[in-house]
Amino acid sequence: MHNKTIAELAKGLADGDFSSVELTRHFLQRINTLDSQYNSFITVTGEQALAQAEAADALRAAGNAGKLAGIPIAHKDIFCTEGVLTTCASKMLSNFVAPYDATVVSRFKQAGLVTLGKTNMDEFAMGSSNENSFYGAVKNPWALGAVPGGSSGGSAAAVAARLVPAATGTDTGGSIRQPAAFCGITGLKPTYGRVSRWGMIAYASSLDQGGPMARTAEDCALLLNEMAGFDPKDSTSLKKAVPDYTADLNQPLAGLRIGLPKEYFGEGLSSEMGDTIMTAVKEFEKLGATIHEISLPNTMLAIPAYYVIAPAEASSNLSRYDGVRFGHRCENPVNLEDLYKRSRGEGFGKEVQRRILVGTYALSEGYYDAYYRKAQRIRRLIQQDFLNAFNEVDLIMGPTTPSEAFDLGSNTDDPVQMYMEDIYTLAVNLAGLPGISVPAGLVNGRPVGLQILAGHFQESQLLNAAHQFQNATNWHQLAPTANQ
Amino acid sequence: MEWEAVIGLEIHVQLATQSKIFSGASIAFGSEPNTQACAVDLGLPGILPVLNETAVEMAVKFGLAVDAEIGMKSVFERKNYFYPDLPKGYQTTQNDLPIIGPGLVEIQLENGTSKHIRIHHAHLEEDAGKSLHEAFFDENGRGMTGVDLNRAGTPLLEIVSQPEMNSAKEAVAYIKAVHSIVTYLGISDGNMAEGSMRCDANVSMHYKGTPLGTRCEIKNINSFKFIEKAINHEIERQIELLEDGGRVIQETRLYDPDKNETRSMRSKEEANDYRYFPCPDLLPVVLDEAYIEHIRSEMPELPKQKKQRFIDELGLSAYDASVLSSTRAMADYFEQVFQTCGDAKSAANWVMGELSAQMNKDNVEVENCPVSAVQLGQLVKRIIDSTINAKAAKQVFVALWEKEGNSVDEIIADKGLKQVTDTGAIAAVVDEVLAKNPQQVEQYLAAPADKRGKMIGFFVGQIMKASKGTANPQMVNQLLSEKLG
C-alpha cells in the first residue's frame, strides 16, 4: 500500500479497496517502526489523523468525498497548524502551539486530506542539509550516512522512505527541489505568488514559496490543484485563475524547445552528474523535443545576491522572536537587553544567528547601497536573463544540484561550500519562476535530480514535461532498498 | 541681533478607520488590554499584513486638502528596532516613497494675518502598542512592565512640516489648522486626550539671517497647551545654553508636563540604525488618476472654502467667517443656527457672542454644548419676529443653558417674556410713567433738543421696568416722542 502513488491511492479509496482509516493506520505504523532511523518527523499527530480519516471515510460513504479525501500527507513544520506544535525546528519555537492554520493547511483539510504530522527541517528553513535542526539531523533513506538535503529534508526523507505518500515543503533557494533530488522524489516549487504564504513561517518573504513533494509529477499536480490560488490574507498571492494541473499532463512534447544553460554544465558539476543529466535530456529528444544551448550569464551572481537578500529579510522577519510574547525566554532576565540577548542567543542555532548577523550588516546605514541595493539590481539582471531565455525556449533543464547527496557532517565547517550546493536553484527564487526536480538516475548509488524550469505561471507545462519523462523512465519508481 | 526660533512639527494623526491598518482588529479606544489585538497585531509566526484601503483613501483626502502632490506609487518599508511594545521588531511605515508629497497649510496668526507652512510629506504607518510601567509586580514584589497591544497596528498618518514656524504660538496655530483639516475631512476624531493626535517638535535657535542652529526633537507633546509650553521651555533652555557660551547637542528630549521641562532621552550617537528596507510582504501602493478624481469628488467643504462661502453668500465679515469656520463642529453649529433662524448675521452674533462667552466661562466645547443649535436658532428667530426683545432673549438663553426647559416658546410663555406690541397697552404704561414723574417731564420739555436724547432714556428705562421688560422698545420710543412732542 505504501508504494502506491496518490493517484493510485485515490483510486483505491474510490473503489473501496481500502478505507482512509486503514491507510492512515498503515502509514502511522510505518512512521512508528521506521522513523527512528531517519528522524524525519518532529511531531506525529496520530489521534488527530485517525479522526480525520474517519471523517473522510464517513464523507465517502455519504458520497460527498472529494478526489483526495482520506489521503494522508505531512506538513513541513514551518506551516502553522492549529492546536499542534509548530516549531520551525528551532528551540525558539519548541513550545509554540499555533492558534491558527496556514492557508495551505486549511485548504488540504477542506479537501479532506489527513495530516499525519509535522516534518523535520533546517531551523527556520536555513540550510541545505537538514543538519541545522534543534531536533537533530535527518538521515537520507538511500544512505543513512548521507544528508537528505534541506531545508525540507524531513518531508523528502519521509516521502522517499514511504512513511507518507506526499508532504508539503517550502522553497526559498532550493529547499524543495534539492532535498527532492537527494532523496529521489519529485518536488515542485511553484511561481512566487501562486501558493499563499499565510501561516507559513517567514524566512525570506520575497523568495519563500510553498509547494508539494511527492513521488510523481502527477501527484504534484493533484496536490497543487488544492494548494494554489489567491488568498486575500496574502498580499503577494496573485489573483489569477488556477487551471486543473492534471489536464495537460499527457500533452505530447513534439516541438517542445528545451534550453540547456551552458553555465549549468560547467565547472563544479561532476562528470557522472553531467552524464546522468544529459541522458535524461536525451529522453526528451526521443519524445520529440528539440535541445538548444542557451546562456544565463549572471548565474554566478545568484549566490552573492541571494545571500544578501535572504539574510536581510530574515534579519527583520526573525526580530519578533524576542522572548516577550511567545517562544523561548531565557531564565531570570536582569533587564530588557539581557532578555533579548539571552533569549535569542539561546533560542537560535548557529546558522540562523549567522544569517541574522549577515542580514543586519547588509541593511546597516552606510552598507545598504553596497549590499542590499546592489543585490536587488543583480536580482533584476537575473530575472532578465530568464525572460530573455524564455523568448527562445519553452523550458530550461539542468541538474538540480552539483553532486549527489553528500555525507553528514562533510560541509558543516564551511558555510560557503554549503551555500554553493544551491548554485542551480537559487536564481529561480530570485526570478520568482516555477521549477521542478524529478528523479533522473543514481550517482554512486544515490539519487540525483533533473531540474526543469518554466516561465511564470507555466506550472502546467512543467508538470506535463515531468510527467511525460516519468512515463518514459522509471527512476521515480526506485525506492531505497531498505524499504521495498 | 535677535534670536529666532525655527520649529518643525511631526504630527501623528490616528485615522478614523474601523479596523487596523494591516489587520481586521478594531481600533476602538479604551478596551481592556490586549482584547483588540489579533494574530497579526501580536506578530505571531506566519502572519501577513493586508493593507486597509480606507487608510489609503484618508491619506489621499488629506493630501488633496493641503494641495499636496499625491504619491502615485508609494512603498511601505520596515523600520527595524527592538522594543517590547513593537511586536514584530519592526514598524511598517513609509520612508523613501511616501503617499503624500509636498503640500501647504495656511495658519491664522493672532494679529489677524495668515502664514503658509509647507508640508514636507505625509506618510502612512502602523502605531506601536503601549508599555505600562505601573501596577505590575512579580511574586517577589519587583516592578514589571506590562504590554498592551490594543493600539498596535492602529493606522497613523504622520504629517511632517518644513521647519517654518518661528514661535510656539505659530506652532499651535499650525497644529490647530491641521486639526481643523483632519476633523473637517472626517479622517480623524482629532481627540488629543485619547492620543488621536500626537506631536513631536524639532526646535533650533539662530540669529536671523545666519545659518540654522542645531536642533533638538521634543517628543510626547499631546495637547495644544503642552505644545506651547514645551516649545517655549525648549526655546528658553537653548537661548540660556547658547548665551552662556554652550552648544546645543542634537538629541531627542522628552517633555514632562508635570514638571514643565524637557529632559534628554537619547543623543544622536545613541540613535538607532533603523535599517529601513521595502517590506516584502506588501506590494507598492499604486494609484491612478481616476482613483484620485473619485476621492476629489467626494471631498467635503474645507475650512478655507467654508470661510469664503460665509463671506460671499452669507455676507459675514472676514473675521466672523474665519472664527465660525475654524472647526467643523463650530461651523456645523453655526450653520444649523442660521438655517433655523434664517438670518446669518444674527446667528453669527449669537454664536460668537452669548454662546461663546458662556462656553468659555463653563469651559465647554461646542460638541457638548448644553444648548443645541436648533434651540439657539429658534431663540434668535423669536427675536427677529419680535416675539421677545434682546433682554428677554438673554433670560431664555440662560434658561436653556441651565436646562430649565427644552422649548424656547415654552420658556417664553412660562416666564411671561412675550413682548407687548399692543399700542394701547404700551400707551397706558407710558401715560402712567409720565404721570408719576411730572418733574422729569418738565425738565425734559425745558431742555434744549440736543440734551433731550439722553433724558428720554430715563423714561424708556422706567417704562421697561414697569412692563417687566416685555414692552417693544421701538414702540416705546415712538410713543414717547409723540406724547412729549
Image (cartoon, rainbow, N blue to C red):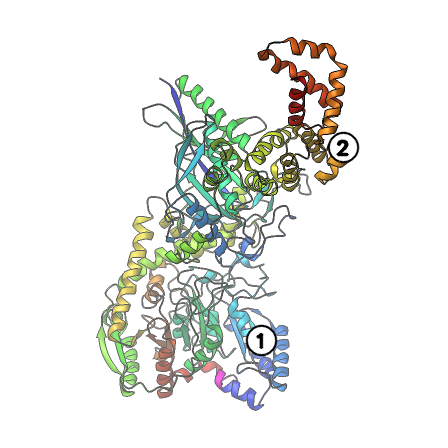
Q: Which residue is mark 1?
A: A32
**In the displayed structure, would residue B221 be above or below residue A78?**
above
Residue A295, quarter of the rendered image:
bottom left
Q: Nearer the viewer, residue B361 or A245?
A: B361
Q: Nearer the viewer, residue B116 or B5?
A: B116
Residue A118 visible to the viewer: no
**In the displayed structure, would residue B180 be above or below residue B361?**
below
Q: Which mark is residue B416?
A: 2
Is the residue under label 2 in contact with that under label 1 (CB below 8 Å)?
no
**In the displayed structure, would residue B257 be above or below residue A348?**
above
**Position in image of residue B217 (x %, y %):** 45, 33
Marks 1 and 2: which is nearer the front?
2
Same subunit under labels 1 and 2? Answer: no
Binning the other alpha carbons within 10 Å of mark 1 as few (below 14), some (14 to 19) or many (20 upward) gives: few
Q: CA distance from mark 1 to mark 2?
A: 97 Å
Residue A417, quarter of the rendered image:
bottom left
> Label 1's element?
helix
What is the span of residues highlighted in magenta in the rendered image?
A: A2-7
